[in-house]
Image: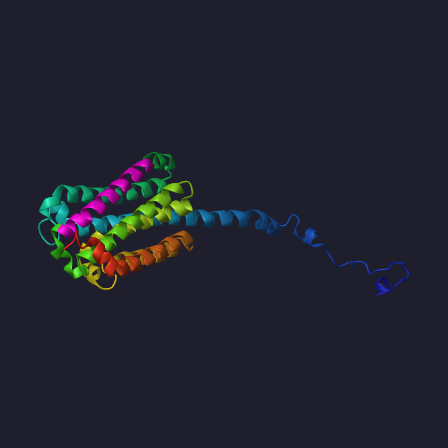
Amino acid sequence: MEEYAHGAKTGVEYPPIPRFYRSPISVWEGSDMANTMTVATPASAAKITEGRINADRLFYVVAAGMMLIFTAGGFRHFYLHGRAPWGDMTNQIVPLIVAHGLAMSGWVILFLVQSILILTGRRRLHMVIGPLAGVLAAAIVILGSTVAPLSVRFSPQIYASLGGPRPFLAMMFVQMLSFGTLVGTGLVYRRRPEIHRPMMLLATIVIQSGALGRFPYIENLAAFPPLYVWGPVLLFGGLLFVLQWGMSRTLNRWYLMGYAGMVMASFMSVAVGHTALWDRMVSSFVP
């Protein structure tokens, strides 16, 4: 107690550190706990981060595999018999329909291949193949924007369950616009994987409307108002968001923003397709 007295014996103006006190530095220096805090924790964090990255890459392979299954199942009549689900293809545009179907199928296969290349660490080959995606995407937009109006002109009766040929045409044009926008965004940000990958995935989901709408057991969802062909697409896209969240333990905000854009585009296409202005615009071409 004498050491704490002001000016007593020691003449110390302020109380010194008690003899039993040890500096935090001296306690931690050289201890195993210090090594744990400075070495093991960063290593553990790096391992967790690497695990999440690998899980995220695996997610894209899983999603691509699912879409390939939907494509094969939905267009099984096309692949096996050269026919549409409702019967023969529209005679006047058979070559265009075949080219359109092959381009769409090629895109899904390419997406799966590219996802596998990233998962296996073959990034350079992934980048070399990349320009093919731009060419294929352009072909899909051109063919889709051509086949849709010709199909509703020559075979309007097959779209009665989808709200009619004129509203259906509005939905198809908006889908092609959405696909092109998402692919374009993905290509612009091809060196930023956190943006590139979800944009390319969402673009592939958008063009799954035909496959999902013809897949066994879920095909009735494609005729469910008010979203019609958008319904299975939005449902599938939402489920994939949850799957990615579960696998990587992270929320992909770029995917979420792109998905929100898809939702807005879907409602916009339905609203536009039922306006008097749109009806007048296409009345001379579509019965």
Whether residue 212 can be seen here: no
* Image quadrant where residue 223 sits: bottom left
Membership of 140 in magenta stretch: yes
Which image quarter holds the C terminus? bottom left
Along the viewing direction, whichever of 45 and 182 lies nearer the viewer = 182
Q: What percent of the width, then of the height, locates residue 20?
A: 75, 59
Up-down relation of residue 155 to residue 110 (above or below): below
Up-down relation of residue 95 to residue 149 (above or below): above
In the rendered view, does 144 fall on the left or right side of 255?
left
Which image quarter holds the N terminus? bottom right
Membership of 85 in magenta stretch: no
Q: What percent of the width, then of the height, locates residue 106?
A: 23, 42
* Image quadrant where residue 3 sits: bottom right
Classified by dominant secondary structure, the portion drawn in magenta counts as helix
**Residue depicted at 49% across the width and 47% down the height:** 46
**Residue depicted at 30% across the width and 58% down the height:** 268
Along the viewing direction, whichever of 21 and 53 lies nearer the viewer = 53
Q: What percent of the width, then of the height, locates residue 175?
A: 27, 51
- Total residue callouts: 0
User: Magenta residues?
Assistant: 130-153
Along the viewing direction, whichever of 226 and 26 lies nearer the viewer = 226
Q: What percent of the width, then of the height, locates residue 21?
A: 74, 58
Give the image's coloring scheme. rainbow
Whether residue 233 can be seen here: yes
Along the viewing direction, whichever of 129 and 279 lies nearer the viewer = 279
